[in-house]
Image: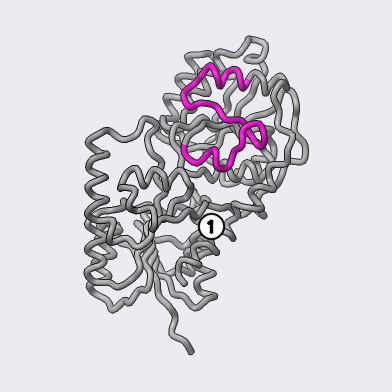
Amino acid sequence: MTKPKKIAVLCNYELLPERVGGMDYFFWQFNQKCKSTNIDVDWFFPNGANHGAYKSMTIKYDPSKSIEGLFLENLSQTDNHYTHIITHFLELCTPFFQQVKQVSKAKIIGVDHNPRPLEGYPVAKRLKKRIKGLIFSRYIDLFVGVSEYTINELLKDFGNHLKPKTKVIYNGINTLEIEARTTRSIVKPTFLVASHLRFSKGIQDLIQAVALLPGSIKKEIKIDIFGDGPYKMQLLSLVKELKLEHCFDFKGSSAQLKSLYCLYDYMLQPTYMECFSLSILESLAANVPVITTNVGGNEEAITNNDNGFIFEARNIPQLTNLLQDVYLGNKKITADTRKLIEDHFTIDKMVVNYLKLLS
């Protein structure tokens, strides 16, 4: 019997049973597919877990150590001959990758999931990243971005010399879990927001945009907000200050979100920063068009006037006008938005593309 290939996957991603998202499902399915193709996987996370399929995975963790420190310790203490080392949510082009290469012959694949600030990094940070790219990028064999936007930003950060060893692998979702909406209201549509509540998600702009709507619309429009986060109290205060309590309903986090998208006509995502949003993919899979900003990889999934509407980030008057037109039926999306996701952005495709990296 052929000896199994062995790989390591390092993920600076906390495993929480109350917050199971698209990456959790990817990790579970990727691990299952590796097992079925005679590949053993050692997973390195900040914490252990036994919810979902994590109970069947080989997880190594030590809350007192960084992922990098734990992995280097593991390499020094055990005879682990990994063929591939994949990193998710770890800072790229750091001395860690040089240290790994000094003790391992594995192919190192660094996956970039990080959105960049709307205004870009400060000059000092840009310079520091460029220097790190010149020194440490040689120790990473392949850079994977979750969107074309991510690859372009990665090249800006670390240098265009990396272009020959970059690849896009889009995030994907399990469409079978998402119920699709069969009809859509042309006038007076319903809206949801599905987002972590932090400043960079721009929900404060949405609140201010609603405040600028004509009184007749402002009396009727309803927007349900699913999610939680550190900016929640500021958002609630702004809603109260602008006397919009009847417009916004903060629903909190929901484990049933995949079955709730189809209850709405449009999703709103006024974000300032995004790599490639899983919530956008989920909404489209539910046949719910998305109204979002021109940042990150949003326009790689949303085509303006086709499966959603694009507006300029932080342009509150533009968002107000768009909301008014959509609410009155002057602008509408009639296409079935699910097919794009089924054709291009499934978790099956994502897993297959990552498996190809191990050949």
Q: Residue at x 75, y 29 (%)?
A: 185
**Circle 1 crowding by C-alpha within 10 Å: few under 14, some 14–19, many from 20:** some
Q: Say whether residue 305 is magenta.
A: yes
As drawn, is 148 to the left or to the right of 258?
A: left
Q: Secondary structure at mark 1?
A: helix
- Total count of labels: 1
Q: Is residue 221 above or below residue 288?
A: above
Could you tell me if residue 88 is visible in this image?
Answer: no
Which residue type does callout 1 highlight? Tyr
Report the front residue among 356 and 218.
Answer: 356
What's the coloring here?
one colour
Q: Residue furthest bottom?
A: 1
Q: Is residue 313 above or below residue 7?
A: above
As drawn, is 74 to the left or to the right of 285?
A: left
Report the front residue among 196 and 330.
Answer: 330
Q: Position of residue 248 (x, y in %)?
A: 57, 24
Q: Residue furthest right?
A: 183
Q: Position of residue 194 (x, y in %)?
A: 55, 37
Q: Position of residue 349 (x, y in %)?
A: 58, 59
Q: Position of residue 64 (x, y in %)?
A: 25, 57
Could you tell me if residue 263 is visible in this image?
Answer: yes
Q: Residue at x 51, y 26 (%)?
A: 312
User: Magenta region: which residues?
Assistant: 296-323
Q: Residue at x 50, y 44 (%)?
A: 276
Q: Is residue 266 above or below residue 90?
A: above
Q: Residue at x 58, y 52 (%)?
A: 173
Q: Say whether residue 9 is magenta.
A: no
Q: Quadrant of residue 306?
A: top right
Query: Residue beneath label 1, please?
Result: 25
